[in-house]
Image (spheres, grey):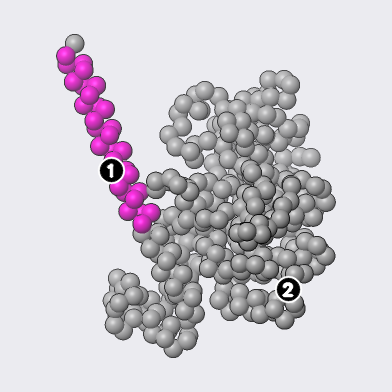
Amino acid sequence: MNLEDLGFNKNLENFRNEQSLASFGIGRVIAEHKASYIVKTENGEFCAEMIGNLRHSATNRSDFPVVGDWVAISEHGNNRAMIQSISPRKTVIERLAVGKYAKKQIIASNIDYALIVQAVDRDFNINRIERYLTICNIAGVKPIIILSKIDLISPSCLADFQNEVRERIKSIQVISISNKTNIGYDELTSMIEKGKTYCLLGSSGVGKSTLLNNISGKELMKTGTISMSTKKGRHVTSHRELVVLKMGGILIDNPGMREVGITDSESGMENTFDSIIKLSENCKFRDCTHIHEKNCAVKMAVESGELDRKSYENFLKLEKEKAHFESTTLDRRKKDKNFGKMIKNFKKNKRSKK
């Protein structure tokens, strides 16, 4: 295996030379375990940690390595290494961190395509697909929708689901698969490109780990069942992991996400709900909220049936979440600034008393 098989390119090589990192090894983070990382290189895999300077200079979670990152390492024997530098990220898929105040959580980096997996046998939800589309559009990652477990429903029911998705979400490739019979796998594997990185996104129990096992031809991830009490998937994948596929692509599996919080990117919403954005250009008021105003082109399109009502309602919900994130982020920055001033004044007063 060479670095190109892992997705290494000219831009990464240029950064390496510009930063005088040629004396170090180069590899890609394929797994993360708290403070340690598994880095894959041409010479094998290494258990790595960050050097002290890199760790102490980190100001937030995004300054630490994540799965998909390219890093410069120094080897220390026994398959251990130290991470000396993290290369700039081409793309970053992130969401609002669960239970954290106005903070983001990076899902994976340097992604080219996101496979949004939605099972058709239980809580099929296009609103959730639109959430994943939004975080993909924020990151500049090309999304592909995967409808899984199609062997558990009738062909007519599947056709209804497919039509529902295509009518509401246009211009996005949709592939229907069965992890049990491998229907649809030929179409899926044919679009995998060598050196490109693909990220699996979806809730627990939709079949992501089974898909990874099937497409890799190996039992790489444990698979689970649906809870009979909650009808929701059990978390089987407990960490993110990068796998090089036999057909040449790179695939990152992720733990199931039951919450996909939207952050602060305007472009992500515009791309996901482009039909609503285009309609809003005809609204009477430039700052129209599309809720209470008269002569709102968006509301009129909903009433006439031109615009899907459920998509409109989901748009309003995500807009509200985005606005809340922006306001709480500003509030957090203000508190951090005031805290910084307090510490500065405390140190100043302490020095004046000496």
Mark 1 or mark 2, earlier in chain: 2
Image x and y of residue 169, in percent: 57, 73
The relative height of residue 195 versus residue 159 in the rendered view (above or below) is above
Which quadrant would residue 344 be assigned to in this image?
top left
Residue 13 in view, yes or no: no
- Image point (50%, 67%), residue name: 272
**Residue 204 located left or right of residue 319:** right
As helix, strand or loop, the secondary structure at mark 2 comes to loop
The quarter in which the C terminus is drawn is top left
Residue 333 in view, yes or no: yes
The relative height of residue 236 versus residue 316 in the rendered view (above or below) is above
**Residue 264 located left or right of residue 9:** left
Q: Which residue is label 2 attached to?
A: 153
Disc marking residue 54 = none
Image x and y of residue 234, in percent: 65, 52
Which amino acid is tagged 2?
A: Ile
CB atoms of marks 1 and 2 within 8 Å: no
The relative height of residue 73 versus residue 235 in the rendered view (above or below) is above
Disc marking residue 334 = 1
